[in-house]
Structures are given as C-alpha cells and as structure tokens.
Amino acid sequence: MKLNGELTDSLNFYMGHEPHDLIAKYGSPLYVYNERIFREKCRDFKHLCKYPKFVVNYAIKANSNLTLLKIAKQEGLRAEVTSIGEIELLLAAEYDACDIFFITNNATTAEMQYAIDKGITFSADSLSQLDRYGRLNFGGKVAARFNPGIGSGHHQGVVTGGEETKFGINESEIPQVKEILAKHNLTLIGINQHIGSYILDIKIFIDSVKRMLNIAANFDTLEFIDLGGGFGIPYHKQEGERPLDIAALGTALCEFMGDFSAKYGKQLTFMVEPGRYIAAESGVLLGNVTAIKYNAAKYIGTDLGFNVLMRPLLYDAYHGIEVYRNTTEETANTAQPPFPIKNEIVHIVGNICESGDYIAKNRNLPIIQEGDVLGVLDVGAYGFSMTSQYNQRLRPAEILIREDGAIQVIRRRDSYADLLRNMRVD
Ligand SMILES: *Cc1c(COP(=O)(O)O)cnc(C)c1O
C-alpha cells in the first residue's frame, strides 16, 4: 500500500509491481527504472526542433547503464562523453565513433591519442589543451569549448560557465585560438558550451546561445555548434513544481538555428546535450526503513546511505519521497486503513558512518514504521552513476520495467567477491 504514492501512481511507474515485492526479489537498496518514461524523455528532445540538422547528444555521465544507452540509441540520440571509460561503454552498446562527442576537461595526452585513433571528435577546453592536441594531430580536426560568460545551476558545484569556473576558452582568447589552429594546421569544426546543470529558466540558456553565436561568427570552418545541456527537471513536483517549458525552448532554439545558418552561409549542425532531463525522472531508488530513532529530532534510519545516492550530501539536493507499507492481502482488504494519514516532520538518514549521511532533512511525510519501504524519486540521473563502495557496501542492482511490464535486471547487485576483485589477496 502506498501512503503517499500519488506521483508514481499517476505515472503508472511500477506497472502493477509492488515495491516490497521488488525488494524481496532483487534486494535492497534497488534502482528501478521505467522504460516508457525514459523513452518519452528521449523523444521530448529528439523532437524539440524541426531544424533538419538538429542532433541530441545524451550526456551519458547522468546514467551510463548499457541497456539505457541502447534504448537512447534506438530513440535516435547520439552521445556526449567525458572519459575513455564512457566511450568504451558506448562502443559496447554499439554506438558508432562518429556519434560520440568527447568533451574533455584537462585531458591527458593518452586520452587525446585515444580519440584520434578511434576517430572521435575531441573538444579542447583551454588554449594549452588545444595546443597539446595540435602537437599530436597536425592537420587534424578539432572542436573547442567556449565559456559564454554566463553560468547557471542548482549549486555552485555544477555552474560551469561565467567567471568562477575552470571550464572553457574565453571569447577574448579567440585571436590565440586562431594562432594555435594555424600553427598546427588544425581545422576548427565545432564549438561547444555547457553553462551548468539544472536550468529551468529558458531565458538564461537563450542568452548563452546568443553569445555562442557571436563567438561562432569568428570562425568560417565550423560544421557544428553544440549548445550544451543542463536542462532541469522539477524535483519538487510533489508540491506542484512545473517542468521545463520544452515547447517554448524548442521554438526559440529552432529560430536561432535557421537564422544563424542563413547568415553563416551554410546549414550547420546544432547539438544539445541533455543528461539529467533524459534520465532523472525514469528512476526511483527503493530502500528499507530499518530504524526509528529520537534525538533532537525524529530520525528514520534506512539502508540508503550516500554510497547509493550522493546528491543530497554533495549538492544539498532535494528528492521527493514516497512511503510504502507492506500489507498482506488479508489486512489490505479488511484492516481500517490509517486514514486520514497523519504526517510528521522527520530526517531520513542512511547507514554510513558519517553525520552528513542523509537523504532528506525536515521532511513532512506520513508517519513511517520499521519495515516500510521508501521510494526516492527522480534518481535516474546522477544516482547510480555516482554510487560507490564506501564502507565496503555493495552497489545496488538496477532493474528496468519494460514497456510491457516485464522486469529485467540490467545490472546485478555487487557481490562480496567484487569487493576483493582488484586487490592483492596473498
Ligand atoms: C554534465 C554535462 C552535460 C549534461 O548536464 P545535465 O545537467 O545532466 O544535462 C552536458 N554537457 C557537458 C559538457 C557536461 O559536462
């Protein structure tokens, strides 16, 4: 029985499966994804603009589960990556090298050489990186990341444009960019930006696009302009927060693309790189309530430590929470339900030996009991991908509820053997 399951019910998220049953079968904690929702989010972006050369690169650091990568490919998305490991996963998911854009930050020579050998488009993030790339790949093609001078984000840790950031080449450095390109006979085929993560205000994004187009006008060899990702989702949707106005975003962007190409004299490819938007809302993290405790406040103890969900600790991030109670068939039919459901203010904490280990603070939730299962909402992005084995805990399994309701384990839970796998044991 769901004590406050309006959200997942309205989405038919579990497609008839009971959270308690899922945990009983696949273990706790458990990442649960819904295929239909993931596909819907891919399509939102795929159909954002009618412009003929509009490309969506899924920023796979948000969630790089192989099965989800394959679904994104089926939906016609390409990919944006930050590391060789991410490229290896994409190749395993049968992406073509030409569908991968490698946007690096302070890359090593080995990373550059890997991109060159595989024929993957590489974006340099500073003058010194551009120069280093040129030394390796004389006469080659390259992209460059610019900082449009505007940043945005839900937390200082994810603002990646503006003055206070390590990312990108500044507009004032364009003459030096040209010198370096000439020195190594490089062709600049693309420029890219990414101003930060969690943009819900389209205006900031559009302002950054205008600045990027000004930068683009300085180069006559471009094939593409990549406008970046960072599109937000309503983490406070239980309280009525509205989603990003995707239609308005599409209309505004499409106009820029057509107009700029006309001025540029060539139909350029325009890219965007959503990560969070694609994956976040398709995932729920289930965990067990293992203790109720009163200190200065009421604490709900769970097996949801920051090893399985890092965002609350790292960014002070908010995730909605649903509470599920196990009722046998008999009691479900006969017992008086605890209506009206009473709420109280609690902290939800995990099982890691650090005080910062919380999932939610001061939350107004139905009165929770031991044995309840919690569903932490909107964890499909930067959830599993940020898990660790800290405290030598096992990374959870990931399961996918297919469109027909069937369940697939798309990553098995770590085993204790996994903890030892890379260590010297003699
Ligand atoms: C992380 C990242 C993205 C995706 O950001 P989201 O907020 O998940 O959309 C896109 N582009 C670059 C370069 C990134 O580093």
Image (cartoon, grey):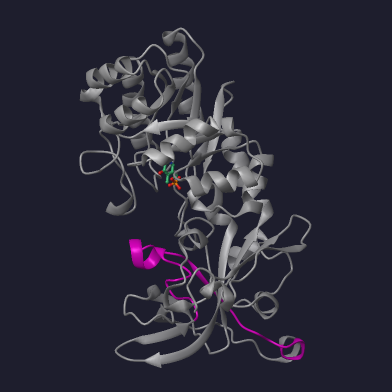
Quarter of the image with the N terminus is: bottom right
Query: How many labels sit on residues?
Result: 0
- Nearest the viewer among 185 and 76 is 185
Q: Is residue 407 left or right of residue 242?
A: right
Q: Is residue 198 left or right of residue 250?
A: left
Instruction: Ligand 1: give its quadrant.
Output: top left
- Nearest the viewer among 315 and 116 is 116
The residue that appears at 46% across and 68% down in the rendered structure is 388
Q: Which residues are magenta?
A: 303-331
Q: Position of residue 199 (x, y in %)?
A: 39, 44
The residue that appears at 33% across and 50% down in the rendered structure is 158
Q: Position of residue 47 (x, y in %)?
A: 61, 33
Q: Is residue 121 left or right of residue 217?
A: right
Q: Is residue 61 visible?
A: yes
Q: Is residue 378 visible?
A: no
Q: Is residue 100 left or right of residue 25?
A: left
- As drawn, which residue projects farthest toward the front? 426
Q: Position of residue 342 (x, y in %)?
A: 50, 83
